[in-house]
């Protein structure tokens, strides 16, 4: 059949134009809403079917449950829903030797769709060639039921002239998806075969993946296909009814939309499956062959139809073939697979098929290719080989919650939907051009956008962010931490910056270039963007003052690149005379006496990896970086006291008790944008404990550390020492900015995702006493002569200093104090590094513990459980490492080490077997001769 002319603006009236909605499950027009999916996002498999043995028949399509019973699954709606999700993901699912009743088959057909968002108006399909009107029974008792389609090779030969020994027939002609000629076609179909060819091969069915067919289109053809619709047509019914004198069902065939005897419908060429959110080729098979591709020429239509059919018929690696046995069941998703029976036998094959009506087909521009998600989703959901990891908590992110409340209504909490990057172009365009909205405001300030002065600008950025979805941060707390460097890429934050655009577009790339230029090549990059990095243990305490390239970095946003001569600082709010200053103004020693301080800055997340290893905790939009012991550094800062600048502005007005500090980086929180804001109390400033610094270790501040000016708050956590400072505002109360009010909070151990509120947490300011062992490393084999050489650091915030460091080689029972001469000099605001030869006669696994006492006699809790908190902040517990002690001062050990050296056998890893004989048979027999008896009888 020829398509409507592509040379006219509108198709003939007989060819309805299909609306292509831009949002999932929404079709324009009030009337259309009665036949759309109720899902607002794809569904996620919960794991309820994991108790049954299963396997994937091919890599891309088909799963079989060889032992599961559908009658059992029918008792549990959660399992039915998970079955529907698996059918939609894998295309078709097989069950062997079921023998389910007609009623159970119909119930399952209804529930598969009802539990996955089908419209209320969609029921079970009634085939136009009615069983009852043809007198075809669906069981041995003569039952007539139009909601069951009897699939019969004899009926096919009689009415459709199929399954005859006709060598002229091309097998690919049989490919189709069920009832696509209906206005509202099928979602799921269930076929149980009860009669198969006896004593002969043949009668198999093949299914092909529409997802995979879409993925094999080139990007250009994908784009073309996504813009097209196709007319599906089934002319055979009318012809058959005339030839055989049969009456056709012309009313409500499972949906109020499915009426009439035209058997023709317009659907998108590429269809979105609402259950998975994946794109699938939909315009293929004999019902499209009898129709046409709309809005193209006849020749173009034929070419496209032939090519789409070739994709599913000629690519065997996107197909699955199933050999039927009696009472086997196949369940497939007609939205995303095509199927055909093999034309290779003349025997009888018959079964009952239930076809459920779904939603009206649509294409969602924001949906995704299955290649991005299908393997991941399937592996995370149903991969049986990793079950032992899930059971042992090694893949904790996959564990479903366990509801033991009992009694009342079950608690249901939606699983997280792992989505991809999507964009509502129309919504973004309505906001305006980001390159103009968020253009550079100040000359010499690259990567900076002023948000706090312009609420309307914030609102527009919020709309742009809400018009897009972003992939989740990589999970690293519930499973193995990636063994890459950078460990975490920060994809979420990169996409946010690119999404807002304008001056933020290049920030992720510029920031990474700054990291590579200014930081030591051996830095451990825990988060690429916003950058979080620490030096390796061997370099953390290599010097009492940390070299700039080795100083840890904890950024909350990108790195703005600000020219010194273009920079200025404003101090306003509740001050007598608000003023602005250049850097030269602040460096004028006639007005502002210069300060020089040796200061240790520590991130509150230092040693977080220990808390994560015990119990996972809060995840955030900036991932809780898995800091080890290197998120601490000491430098000599030069600058001036903030107190002097406040005084130069005439002092504070009545009521002002806090100074709010503004950093030029852009910070994101819950689809909101802002500059980085925190506050410090006036009492801290008044004590000359807040420095405005422009120099670090004798050099201008590195860009990554806040050039041209940063704040250094003595004794406070690093989050309060704002970088790229450009404004200070005197205020009455602590800042309500998220970093101050909703983050860096210390919660009680019973507070977590189920109940936490920001007001339940203590705002973290001063760091408590802490310490860490930098050498040796945990699980390291240490060969020694009775003493293990240990190195590390100790620190206490708030102007307190480490007074004593103690170590234990027996898990904390016996303690040795590090001599003062083995510790670096005392300073009020810095750490002390230390070294100590720890006595250890014991061999094998030992636990070395380190703790610090500060000058106020504060010390560390002995175990990590005492320090654990939901925010994973302030790991203040005694630091513990396990090492394998090999005491070379023992004769037998000394001899064994010599054998390792002589034979060239490796001592590490310990799990490798020895490559030499550890005892000769002569030595073995001699021992027992001298130490008899080996066994005793009484």
Image (cartoon, grey):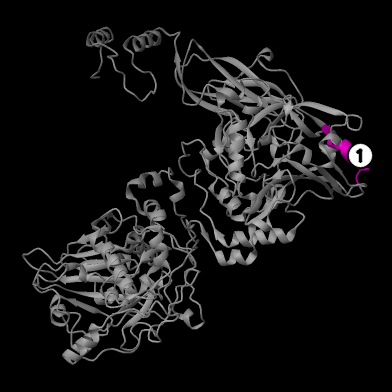
Q: How many marks?
A: 1
Residue 823 location in percent, x, y?
67, 17
Relative to 491, 645 lies left or right: right
Q: Residue furthest front?
A: 7
Foreground: 587 or 525? Answer: 587
| Up-down relation of residue 729 to residue 83 (above or below) | above
Q: Is residue 650 magenta?
A: yes
Residue 504 location in percent, x, y?
64, 50
Q: Residue furthest left?
A: 199
Residue 724 falls in image quadrant: top right
Relative to 840, 64 lies left or right: left
Q: Is residue 565 magenta?
A: no
Camera sees residue 99: no
Residue 805 falls in image quadrant: top right
Quadrant of the frame with the N terminus: bottom left
- Mark 1 residue crowding within 10 angstroms, few (<14) / some (14–19) / many (20+): some
Quadrant of the frame with the C terminus: top left
Camera sees residue 627: yes
| Up-down relation of residue 398 to residue 800 (above or below) | below
Residue 430 falls in image quadrant: bottom right
- According to the image, label 1 marks what residue? 648
Tell me the magenta residue range: 640-652
Residue 250 location in percent, x, y?
31, 89
Relative to 768, 779 lies left or right: left
Relative to 376, 456 lies left or right: right
Name the residue rendered at 65%, 60% in the picture: 462
| Up-down relation of residue 326 to residue 161 (above or below) | above
Foreground: 442 or 707? Answer: 442
Name the residue rendered at 21%, 78% in the picture: 150
| Up-down relation of residue 892 to residue 880 (above or below) | above
Q: Secondary structure at mark 1?
A: helix
Residue 230 location in percent, x, y?
36, 74
């Amino acid at each position: 059949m020829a398509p409507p002319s592509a040379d006219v603006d509108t198709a003939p009236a007989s060819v309805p134009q299909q609306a292509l909605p831009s949002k999932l499950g929404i079709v324009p027009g009030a009337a259309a809403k009665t036949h759309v999916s109720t899902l607002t996002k794809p569904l996620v498999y919960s794991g309820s079917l994991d108790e049954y043995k299963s396997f994937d028949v091919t890599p891309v399509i088909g799963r079989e449950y060889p032992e599961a019973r559908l009658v059992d699954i029918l008792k549990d709606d959660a399992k039915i829903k998970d079955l529907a999700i698996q059918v939609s993901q894998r295309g078709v699912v097989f069950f062997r030797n079921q023998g389910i009743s007609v009623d159970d088959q119909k119930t399952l057909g209804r529930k598969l769709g009802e539990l996955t968002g089908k419209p209320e108006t969609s029921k079970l399909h009634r085939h136009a060639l009615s069983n009852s009107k043809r007198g075809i029974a669906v069981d041995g008792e003569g039952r007539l039921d139009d909601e069951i389609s009897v699939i019969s090779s004899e009926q096919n030969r009689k009415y459709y002239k199929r399954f005859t020994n006709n060598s002229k027939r091309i097998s690919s002609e049989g490919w189709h998806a069920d009832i696509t000629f209906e206005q509202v076609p099928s979602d799921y179909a269930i076929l149980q075969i009860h009669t198969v060819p006896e004593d002969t091969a043949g009668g198999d069915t093949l299914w092909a993946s529409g997802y995979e067919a879409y993925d094999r289109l080139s990007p250009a053809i994908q784009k073309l296909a996504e813009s097209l619709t196709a007319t599906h047509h089934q002319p055979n019914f009318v012809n058959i009814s005339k030839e055989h004198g049969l009456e056709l069902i012309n009313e409500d065939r499972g949906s109020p939309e499915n009426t009439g005897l035209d058997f023709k419908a317009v659907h998108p060429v590429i269809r979105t499956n609402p259950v998975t959110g994946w794109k699938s080729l939909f315009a293929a098979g004999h019902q499209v062959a009898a129709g046409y591709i709309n809005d193209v020429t006849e020749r173009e239509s034929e070419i496209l139809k032939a090519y789409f059919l070739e994709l599913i018929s000629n690519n065997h690696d996107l197909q699955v073939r199933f050999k039927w046995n009696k009472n086997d069941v196949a369940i497939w998703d007609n939205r995303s697979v095509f199927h055909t029976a093999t034309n290779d036998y003349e025997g009888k094959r018959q079964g009952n098929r239930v076809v459920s009506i779904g939603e009206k087909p649509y294409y969602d521009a924001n949906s995704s290719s299955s290649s991005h998600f299908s393997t991941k989703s399937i592996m995370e959901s149903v991969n049986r080989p990793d079950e032992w990891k899930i059971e042992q908590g090694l893949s904790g992110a996959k564990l479903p919650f366990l509801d033991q409340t009992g009694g009342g209504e079950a608690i249901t909490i939606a699983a997280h939907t792992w989505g991809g990057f999507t964009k509502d172009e129309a919504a973004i365009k309505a906001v305006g051009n980001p390159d103009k909205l968020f253009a550079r405001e100040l000359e010499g300030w690259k990567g900076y956008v002023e948000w706090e002065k312009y609420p309307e600008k914030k609102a527009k950025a919020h709309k742009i962010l809400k018009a897009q979805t972003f992939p989740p941060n990589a999970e690293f707390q519930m499973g193995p931490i990636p063994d890459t460097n950078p460990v975490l890429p920060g994809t979420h934050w990169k996409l946010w910056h690119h999404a807002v655009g304008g001056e933020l577009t290049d920030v992720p790339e510029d920031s990474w270039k700054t990291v590579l230029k200014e930081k030591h090549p051996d830095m451990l990059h825990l988060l690429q963007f916003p950058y979080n990095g620490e030096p390796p243990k061997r370099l953390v305490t290599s010097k009492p003052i940390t070299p700039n390239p080795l100083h840890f970095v904890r950024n909350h946003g990108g790195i703005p690149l600000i020219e010194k001569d273009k920079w200025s600082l404003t101090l306003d709010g509740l001050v007598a005379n608000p003023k602005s200053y250049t850097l030269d103004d602040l460096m004028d020693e006639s007005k502002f006496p210069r300060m020089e301080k040796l200061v240790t800055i520590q991130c509150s997340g230092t040693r977080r990896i220990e808390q994560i290893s015990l119990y996972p905790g809060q995840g955030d939009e900036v991932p809780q970086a898995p800091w080890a012991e290197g998120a601490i550094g000491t430098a000599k800062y030069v600058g001036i006291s903030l107190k002097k600048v406040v005084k130069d502005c005439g002092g504070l007005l009545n009521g002002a008790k806090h100074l709010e500090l503004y950093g030029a980086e852009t910070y994101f929180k819950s689809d909101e944008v802002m500059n980085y804001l925190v506050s410090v109390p006036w009492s801290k400033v008044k004590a000359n404990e807040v420095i405005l610094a422009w120099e670090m270790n004798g050099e201008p501040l590195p860009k990554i550390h806040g050039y041209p000016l940063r704040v250094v708050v003595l004794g406070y956590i690093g989050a309060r020492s704002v970088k790229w400072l450009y404004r200070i505002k005197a205020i009455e109360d602590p800042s309500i900015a998220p970093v101050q009010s909703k983050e860096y909070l210390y919660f009680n151990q019973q507070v977590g995702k189920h109940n936490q509120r920001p007001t339940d947490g203590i705002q973290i300011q001063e760091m408590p006493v802490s310490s860490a062992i930098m050498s040796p490393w945990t699980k390291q084999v240490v060969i020694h002569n009775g003493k293990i050489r240990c190195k590390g650091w100790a620190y206490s915030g708030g102007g307190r200093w480490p007074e004593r460091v103690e170590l234990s080689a027996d898990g904390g029972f016996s303690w040795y104090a590090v001599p003062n001469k083995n510790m670096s000099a005392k300073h009020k605001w810095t750490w002390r590094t230390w070294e100590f030869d720890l006595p250890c006669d014991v061999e094998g696994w030992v636990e070395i513990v380190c703790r610090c006492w500060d000058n106020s006699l504060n010390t560390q809790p002995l175990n990590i459980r005492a320090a654990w908190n939901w925010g994973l902040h302030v790991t203040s517990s005694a630091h513990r490492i396990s090492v394998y002690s090999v005491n070379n001062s023992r004769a037998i050990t000394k001899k064994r080490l010599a054998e390792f050296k002589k034979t060239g056998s490796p001592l590490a890893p310990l799990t490798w077997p020895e490559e030499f004989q550890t005892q000769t048979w002569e030595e073995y027999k001699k021992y027992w001769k001298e130490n008899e008896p080996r066994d005793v009888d009484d």
